[in-house]
Image (cartoon, rainbow, N blue to C red):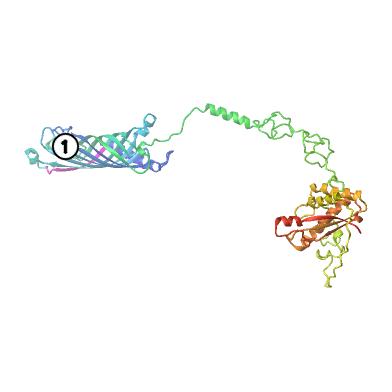
Amino acid sequence: MFKIVFLFTVFLTSLCCSVSSQTDLNDFNVYNKWSLGISFGSHDGMHPTQAVTKIHHFNHYGFETRYMFNNRVGIKLDFGYDLMNFSKVSIKTNYWRSSIQGVLNLGDALRFDTWTNRFGLLFHAGFGMSHMWLKEDSRTTQQVQDDPLFDGVDDMVNYTFGLTPQIKLNNHFSLNANVQFTCHNRQSKTWDWRQDNIPENIRGGMDGYLFNLSVGLTYYIGKKKTHADWTPTIYAVVFDNTELLSHIKELQGQLQDDDGDGVINAKDQEPNSLPGAIVNSKGVSVIDSDLDGVEDSRDLEPNSPKGAIVNSNGVSVIDSDKDGIEDSRDLEPNSLPGSIVNSQGIAIIDSDGDGIQDKFDACPLIPGLFSENGCPKSNKPVVQEPVKQVEVEDDVNDDIKEIMKRALRGVKFETNKSIILQRSFIYLDEVVSVMQDFPQYNLRIEGHTDNVGNDDSNLRLSKYRARACMDYLIAKGIDPSRMRSEGYGETMPIESNQTAAGRAENRRVEFKIIFD
């Protein structure tokens, strides 16, 4: 018996230590682990004794403190006191026991959580020390007192195990019953102190047995919502995965690309495209008869010559002079090879490389400054030539004046550039019509800017913009001898530059009919 209890105790203690160092699917930090317990009940000193213990006397008292390593195993320190009364003798025996025990939550091991959340069951086993002493009264037998070995005390090693059924009251309390069996090693006295009942040859052996039956109350310490006793282990879910595997196989088929066109079967509206066919994002074959990169369904010119450059609509882009501006927008479609052109295809010539086009450069063969109209800076005093007064034709009718005003308001350029926006062409075309209808008119085109930025940059920009408008009119067939362009930068504002609206008015190109 001793070997069985001892080996089981060692096994349970090892299990506690092992499991406490491991993790499982449960989070150990979500439940309380400490508890305190009290109990009272009855006992029976089963052996060795001749007297019968009065079991109905509820003279057993217990106290324990317990710590659970996890929701399955733990350890506890257990204390018990018994006052034994006997039916045949008047002796009263005091008995004290302390032990350390491993605890196994059988309720969790047996999956109680599958059918209840109120009942639990703990198994515990361990070892410790016991001490008993005689409480004498006037009726103590002479036989006991005369025993030469009688000293009124006995100390022994105990081995104990038991079961504790539980009923959960709430998250902090539970009722329990405790059924416990204790055996002693080296018990030298009988429970009723009759020494002659223990043969000399077995004294000191495993010869004491005690049974306890008690009820008690457990208090769970901690602020968590539950205790380890009532936290079931989470197990991997086992289920029939046949249907899942079928779905996976179906999805695998949809993710394949049977016709090899780069579109998976699930999205392919034409799953049997010919090998090498070009398809769209839906797997439908894209037909491009002229191989210009634009499918026939969107190609306005489905038979473009081989190698032709086309736009997004498949229409051939013809650029005769290869200057990067297609002929439909090129005002100089026959520019010399290698010429630098503006957005309208007009060659930009700068012979002296000073950054000022020859047509704006007063010294086209000598590098100069913008502030000097392309000439080198001179130390000679600048003599301002008087501006020749021109007369505005008095009989210019109001319709023509309105056309010039619309051009003033409507001609716009790309920001900080002299490139005319396409929406401005309609206003310039009106000016062209006036110059064609009235060959006696001459035109002065004046460019102006606001005061934002560098003075030289503003002057240069105003000249470029005025010249760009003049170049447009020339391209439309107006004799350049009838026109003159000039830029004044920020020197001639018509509104205050202190406001955004004023600056917008000052950024302008004016068209003035003049009479020489």
Q: Label 1 belongs to which residue?
A: 84
Could you say where residue 60 lies in the image, as x and y percent from the top left? Answer: 20, 37
Q: In which quarter of the image is residue 288?
A: top right
Which of 421/214 is in front? 421
**Magenta stretch?**
150-160
Assess whether residue 315 is covered by the magenta stretch. Answer: no
Q: Looking at the image, is 418 positioned above or below residue 225?
A: below
Could you say where residue 447 lies in the image, as x and y percent from the top left? Answer: 81, 57
Assess whether residue 159 is covered by the magenta stretch. Answer: yes
Residue most toward the bottom? 380
Which of 150/175 is in front? 175
Q: On the picture, is 53 further left or further right than 177? A: left
Picture quarter with the C terminus: bottom right
Q: Which amino acid, by three-letter code, is at mark 1?
A: Met
Could you say where residue 85 lies in the image, as x and y percent from the top left? Answer: 14, 36
Residue most toward the right? 440
Q: Quadrant of residue 213?
A: top left
Picture quarter with the N terminus: top left
Q: On the picture, is 233 further left or further right than 198? A: right
Visible residue check, residue 499: yes
Could you say where residue 170 lies in the image, as x and y percent from the top left? Answer: 33, 36
Task: Tell me which residue sits at (68%, 34%) in the image.
Answer: 263
Q: Looking at the image, is 402 positioned above or below residue 264?
A: below
Mark 1 secondary-structure assignment: strand
Which of 46/326 is in front? 326
Q: In which quarter of the image is residue 196?
A: top left
The majority secondary structure of the magenta stretch comes to strand
How would you rate the neighbour count of disc 1 (Cα within 10 Å): few for under 14, some for 14-19, many for 20 or more? Answer: many
Which of 134/316 is in front? 316
